[in-house]
Image (cartoon, rainbow, N blue to C red):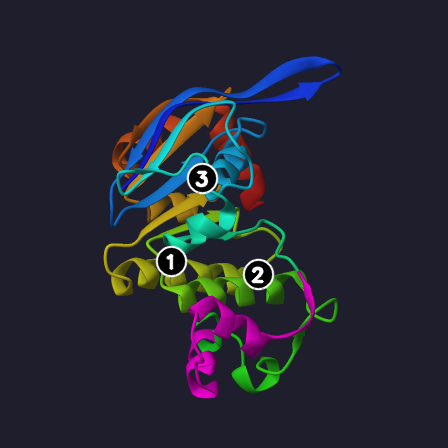
Amino acid sequence: MLELKNLSFSVEENGKQKEILHDLNLSIDNSKFVVITGPNGSGKSTLAKLIMGIEKPTSGQILFDGEDITGLSITERAKRGISFAFQQPVRFKGIRVHDLLRLAAGKDISIAEACNYLSEVGLCARDYIEREINSSLSGGELKRIEIATLLARQTKLSVFDEPEAGIDLWSFQNLIRIFENMQKEIKDSSIIIISHQERILRIADEIVLLSGGTIKKQGSVEDILPELIGTTAAVDACEKLK
């Protein structure tokens, strides 16, 4: 279980403190698929980075499986079973796709196993397994390879920051299937996705609506999605779907 208690985050802007998240409380049970949505500037990506340890909260606590991980590094959180997929995936010059999948899995996986992960995200393994993670890969290719690394890790909690960004329609449709399969196949794992996309919102167990740095609503798709119609979040979602 992931628990956020009285979480706040501020940054300095023009000599003054600007609060991005304010006294936020959130609990996510094991085996849950949760989508966090809301208008631009509401603090969604910041929240994802706080969960992974990329940013540190100004105040409050982050608990994972009952342990206070607020002060732990990214590496320590990763060891405890938390994964993070960036909105813009990182390039690793000199590292092959096979090497990256092996590192993600934490063991010496075979070519066949690595190819299975690539096939799962819609990439022809023959064309990618020996490729370097460099500028020769498109944003969409990098995104799919990054998701393959999360599949290889088999972590307790996977956090995705706008996974649909920069990918084509076919990849997006495949992405929906991947998320559904992840939840079924990885026992007791939870998925948190930062997204505006209605199709991703519709397959969630719960939707969290973030606005102005606080949680405005949290509940089932049936309870929350209809209420988004006509709100700023819904307008943003429609814009993203155009």
Q: Three-letter amino acid code at disc 2?
A: Lys
Q: What stretch is highlighted in magenta?
A: 91-117
Magenta span has 133?
no
**Vertical arrangement, residue 224 with respect to residue 31, above or below:** above
**Kind of element beneath mark 1:** helix
Q: Position of residue 107 (x, y in %)?
A: 42, 75
What residue sits 55% from the left and 71% below the top?
A: 100
Q: From mark 2 to mark 1, how far is it between C-alphas?
A: 14 Å
Few, some or many residues within 10 Å of mark 2 (<14, 14–19, 20+): many
Please name the residue that numbered disc 2 is placed on: 143
Earlier in the chain: of badge 1 and badge 3, it is 3
Earlier in the chain: of badge 2 and badge 1, it is 2
What residue sits 41% from the left and 58% below the top?
A: 176
Q: Where is residue 32 in the image (x, y as percent from the top left)?
A: 27, 46
Q: Where is residue 160 in the image (x, y as percent from the top left)?
A: 47, 49
In the image, 84 versus 37, the foreground residue is 84
**Kind of element beneath mark 3:** helix
Please name the residue that numbered disc 3 is placed on: 51
Using the rendered image of the protein, determine whether residue 121 is visible from the camera's viewpoint.
Answer: yes
In the image, 226 versus 85, the foreground residue is 85
Q: Three-letter amino acid code at disc 1?
A: Phe
Earlier in the chain: of badge 3 and badge 2, it is 3
Please name the residue that numbered disc 1 is placed on: 179
Residue at the limit of the structure toward the top, as seen here: 16
Few, some or many residues within 10 Å of mark 3 (<14, 14–19, 20+): many
In the image, 198 versus 182, the foreground residue is 182
